[in-house]
Image: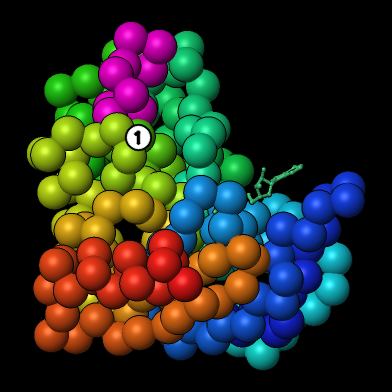
Amino acid sequence: MIQSNNIIKTIGEKMILRGMNLEIASGETVAIIGPNGAGKSTWLKITAGLLKPTEGSLLIDEEPLKKDKYELQQIIGYLGHQSFLYEHFSPVENLRFFAKLYHVKKPDKRIDDLIEEVGLTFFKYEPVRSFSRGMIQRLAIARAILHDPKILLLDEPHTGLDQQAVDILNKVILRLKKKGVTVVLVTHDFPQVIKTCDRVIILKNGRVKDDIPLEGQDVNWLYTHYERQAIHS
Ligand SMILES: Nc1ncnc2c1ncn2[C@@H]1O[C@H](COP(=O)(O)OP(=O)(O)O)[C@@H](O)[C@H]1O
Ligand SMILES: [Mg+2]
């Protein structure tokens, strides 16, 4: 379980998060939506242990984020705006490098399977520098889940992907969901929210504005609801 208890984040003079309260149960797939600048990425980075809250706390399974980075890295998969990939390396070389970093046991089969899952088998020995943005994003997704994290945090993962890659990513999310992985998705892509998520959180001005289950809702409902909550109020 992820618990965000009254998290405040200020950077310089600016208060980015203004008391962020949220609970996400193990195994839930949750979307975080909201206008640009609402604080979505900042909150996700705090949850990934990459930023510290100014006030409040972030608990995972009732414990504060471990200072021990190693332990934290094992539990969490994070995909932000940077891919963290080495452009002179191929997909196989990149994933081997991260497998070592995360102490993944018997990595070769896992690397092969993941490269296949994200549809890069044909390019597995090609250097990443020749890849399109969509191909890099596919590999970055494989990188984020390589060590089998129990919490996966994705910041706008569908952005810039073509339809085929969007479908691949959704399949990955749904597979992990079946396995009981907790998935938190910051996104502007409402159709993908409807396809993959159990619940949606609307963030506005550094606070939770609304928190709603998605069961039985369709994308038109989400657009209308979002407009009412995030734009007109
Ligand atoms: N390192 C930083 N220094 C100063 N301001 C920042 C920094 N990171 C984010 N911000 C500001 O905080 C606000 C929220 O940013 P962010 O969390 O990226 O929003 P979102 O992901 O919802 O678009 C924005 O106004 C942004 O400019
Ligand atoms: Mg953002």
In terms of image quadrants, where is residue 134?
Answer: top left
Q: How many marks?
A: 1
Residue 202 percent location from the top left of the image: 44, 71
Q: Amino acid at mark 1?
A: Gln
Question: What residue do we see at 24% from left, 35% from top?
Answer: 161
The color scheme shown is rainbow
User: Is residue 6 shown left or right of residue 141?
Assistant: right
Magenta span: predominant SS is: helix
Which residue does the image show at 84% across and 73% down from the upper left? 55
**Residue 25 place in picture, x, y as percent:** 46, 87
Q: In the image, which residues are magenta?
A: 128-136
Q: Nearer the viewer, residue 145 or 102?
A: 145
The residue furthest front is: 232
Residue 232 vs residue 40, the one in the foreground: 232
Q: Is residue 211 above or below residue 147?
A: below
Name the residue located 53 percent from the left edge and 34 percent from the top edge: 82
Q: Position of residue 101 (x, y in %)?
A: 60, 43
Is residue 109 something one can see in this rendering?
no
Res. 37 visible in picture: yes
When the figure is inspected, residue 200 is found, relative to residue 205, above or below; the finding is below
Q: Is residue 85 left or right of residue 189?
A: right
The front one of 226 and 29 is 226
Q: For residue 184: magenta?
A: no
Disc 1 marks which residue?
A: 137
Residue 175, x across and y down, in percent = 21, 66
At a point 41% along the width and 67% down the height, the residue shown is 232
Residue 133 magenta-drawn? Answer: yes
